[in-house]
Image (cartoon, coloured by chain):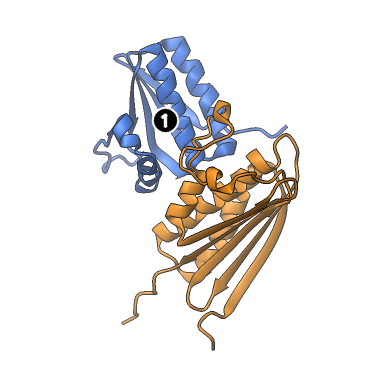
Chain colours: A orange, B blue
Amino acid sequence: MSKNECINEIKITFPSYSTNEGTARAMVSAFCATLNPTVEELSDIRCAVSEAVTNCTVHAYKNVIGTVSLAVRLYADRTVRIEVKDKGCGIADVEEALQPLFTTDPEGERSGMGFTVMESFMDTVSVKSSVGRGTKVTMKRRLSPLPVKR
Amino acid sequence: MLHSVKNVEFSNESGVLTAFVKGEVDHHNAKSARSMIDRELEKIRPAQLALDLSAVSFMDSSGLGLILGRYNKALELGVKFTVRNPTPATMKIISLAGGERIFDVITDNIENDNT
């Protein structure tokens, strides 16, 4: 068996209601739990998903409701790959958006730390965006090996 | 219209208004917590505002926005601001923004508190 073989996958789409931030976290968390991650790993992944989905509800679909696509893949080497995609407004300057404390919405008390949280809590984060067409965030985190059973 | 649960409770003792924030603090839930805390803060005008985060089961950067927003509001009103009892996961988020260098983070000994 190849080390990087995908062993399980889910795909979900949902409307960008803010209540679905919690729904997305809960679903990803339940799915990743099948790999027996540590409490901290699961908590980090939940947080990263929450940030990515919140960006869709707050920024990509500002003042409108659109579709958020979420795909999670689990690999044999215990890598979790999460893709969050929207067809919203897009980001004109991705590099600027990735800067800690950068926000386009200070009135809404956004901390500007969303991408920083994703980058801190996941091993890799990639952001592809096109203005008027949407954004795709892909994040990976390799879970620590399972403790050896005695 | 989607409703938010009441996720903040208050105590007001010896000039300290404590806001006990409960459950999941994300973008969806932060809005109601924000207006509840600000309303109480403006009504009571305490000497100190404490955000007790011991019962927070999840927090992302929206929670950070809530904390920093209340810190700024307290500063504006001349009210001392502290964060109390964040869980390790919550503290991880606070530290990402260097929150502990901006305001006091106090941990009480609550190990024997089974409430």
Side (left or right) of A109 relative to B54 = right
Say which quadrant the C terminus of chain B sits in: top left
Residue visible at 50% across and 83% down? A3
Asked where in the image residue B35 lies, by quadrant, the reply is top right
| Furthest residue in direction left, as rendered | B109
Residue B71 % position (x, y)? 40, 24
The residue drawn where x is 69% and y is 59% is A12
Residue found farthest to the bottom: A1
Q: Seen in the image, is A2 located left or right of residue B77?
A: right
Count the labels in the image. Answer: 1
Q: Position of residue A48 (x, y in %)?
A: 51, 52
Residue, disc 1: B20
From what the image shows, is residue A144 above or below residue A127? Answer: below
Amino acid type at circle 1 is Phe
Q: Say whether residue B114 is visible.
A: yes
The chain containing the residue under callout 1 comes to: B
Of residues B68 and A38, which is closer to you in this image? B68
Quarter of the picture containing the N terminus of chain B is: top right
Residue A6, image x and y in percent?
A: 59, 77
Q: Is residue A77 above or below residue B43?
A: below
The residue at the point 44 percent across, 16 percent down is B41
- Give whichever of B5, A143 is nearer the camera: A143
* Rendering quarter of residue A121: bottom left
Q: Is residue A89 left or right of residue A124?
A: right
